[in-house]
Image (spheres, rainbow, N blue to C red):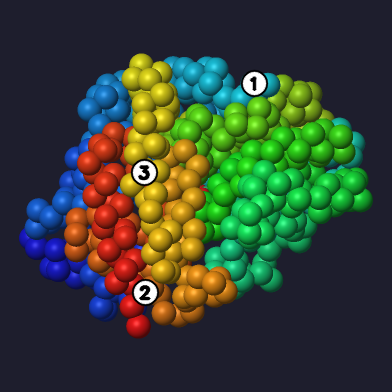
Amino acid sequence: MNNATFAQRDLSVLWHPCTQMKDHESLPLISIKKGDGVFLEDMEGNRYIDAISSWWVNIFGHCNPTINNAIKQQLDTLEHVMLGGFTHEAAVVLSEKLLAVAPKGLSKCFYSDNGSSAVEIALKMSFQSWRNQGNHQKTKFVSLENSYHGETLGALSVSNVALYKETFAPLLLDIISAPSPDCYHREQGESWRNYSIRQFEPMETLLAQRHHEISAVIIEPLVQCAGNMRMYHPIYLTLLRAACDQYNVHLIADEVAVGFGRTGTLFGCEQADISPDFLCVAKGLTGGYLPLAATLTTEKIYQSFYDDYEKLTGFFHSHSYTGNALGCRAGIATLDIFQQQNILQKNKRLAQVMQQAVANFTEHPHIIDVRQTGMIVAIEFVKNKHTKEPFAWQQRRGLKVYEYALSKGVLLRPIGNVVYFIPPYIITEAQINTIAKVALEGIDRAVQN
Ligand code: PMP
C-alpha cells in the first residue's frame, strides 16, 4: 500500500490530535509502517530521523531491543491487573527504582496513564492534603505565564498557552498567574541568572500576600516546552522552593516533558538542588513505548491522607490502567538503560555536538535566538531581528520548515516559529549535523517573501 492510499483510509475513520483536519486536504498525512532506532519509515520506504522523539517521548530509539524484550517477557507473565487492592512485581520494582533516582524526599509513587493526569493528581492531592489537615482556605493554584501542563480541564487551567486555553476559558478554574522567567525577554546584555532572579520578584510578592489561599505553585523546571521552548536559569527554582517553604505552599514540579535527561540531568530540579512536594513524570518514563505517568510525593503528604476510612481522608482517585504492568516493565527497562549505559554522561558529548551544530545560526538575518538546555535546542526566527517583530502566526512559517524537513528525511515539528531538536539519545553526531543543516535550510526557505 502506498502512503496516499493509506492516508485516505485513515482520514475516513480517524480524527487526529491537535489538528485542524481540513489541513489534510493539502498537507499529506505521513503513514508510518515501522520504527527503527532514530528512524521512522513510511509505507513507501522513505525514512525520517525523528528529531523530536515523537512528541518528546522516545528516548532510546524506536523498537529498542532491550525495551522490546522486557515488554515481551512481561506480556507472557502478566499484562495488567487493577491496582486497587492488588499489586504486582513491575509496579513495585519501578517505584523502588524511580524513588531511588528522584530528587530526595520523595517517597511514594501514584500512577496514571498520561502527563495531564499526573498533573491533575498533583493538583487534587495538594488541595486535599490541606483540607485533610483542616485548612479549607487553600483553594488556589499559581502557575507561570507561558506554561503548559496538559489538556484535561484542571491541567489546562494551570496552563497558559492561548491557542489551547482560550476556547475553553469559561470552563476553567480560576488560577493565579505569575510572570515567567523566560529569558527570551531579558534585556540586551542581561544574564539568564539575573533576569530569572528579577522575574522572581512578583512571585515572591504574590506568595507573601496571598499564601493563605494558595495550595500550590506548579512549574515546568528549566524549560517551558510547549510554550515555544522558552528557558530560564535554575536560580528561579531555588528561590521558588525557598519561598514555598517560607509561605507554606506546595511546589509541583511538572517534569513530564523535561524529565529523564532532557535538560542534561535526570530531572531538571537537580540543577537547582531542590526537591518538590510533587513530581509529575510521563513521556520518557517508558522510553516512549506505553502510556504511563506517575505523580511522586513526600511522606508528609502521604501521611496527611493516612487515617481511618470513616474520616474520608483517603485519595479516592483511580484510572482503569493505573500501574499497568506492561508500562511499568518498559519503565524499569528504561531506568536500567540509563544506569547500565551511562547515558547522562554520554549525553554531555551529544549536547556539545548539538551546540556546535547550531553555533553560527544567529548569523542568519532572521534567526533571533538559539538556546539550549542539555539535550534541548531551540531556534527562534522572526520577521525583524532588530525590533523582535514576529511573523504573523497566520502565515504558518513553521509549517514550511516541517514540510521542507520531511522532504529531506527529517521530522521537525516547529512550535510556531521555533524550530527545536529533542532527539532520542541514540542519535549519532552525523545525524545531529544533518538535522541542523536541514533546519537551517528549512528556515531559510520559510522566511522568504
Ligand atoms: N506537562 C507538560 C510539561 C507537557 O509538556 C505535557 C505534554 N506535552 C503534559 C504535561 C501533558 O502530558 P500528556 O500529553 O501525556 O497528557
Q: Is mark 1 within 8 Å of ligand 1?
A: no
Instruction: Residue at 57% x, 74% y: name it.
Output: 387
Is residue 412 visible to us here? yes
Is residue 317 visible to us here? no
- Report the front residue among 319 and 385: 385
Which numbered circle lies on residue 281?
Answer: none
Q: Is mark 2 within 8 Å of ligand 1?
A: no
Of callouts 3 and 1, the N-terminal one: 1
Q: Position of residue 295 (x, y in %)?
A: 59, 35
Local crowd size for mark 2, using a 10 Å CA cut-off: few (<14), some (14–19), many (≥20): some
| Label 2, label 1: how far apart the Cα atoms are | 47 Å
Q: Label 2 sits on what residue type?
A: Val
CB under 8 Å between callouts 2 and 3?
Answer: no
Instruction: Residue at 13% x, 55% y: name it.
Output: 46
Q: What residue does disc 3 label?
A: 356
Of callouts 2 and 1, the N-terminal one: 1
| Tag 2 secondary structure | loop
Q: What residue does disc 2 label?
A: 447
Above/below status of 179 relative to 264: below
Q: Label 1 sits on what residue type?
A: Lys
Q: What residue does disc 1 label?
A: 104
Instruction: Residue at 41% x, 30% y: name it.
Output: 348
Q: Nearer the viewer, mark 2 or mark 1?
A: 2
Q: Label 3 sits on what residue type?
A: Gln
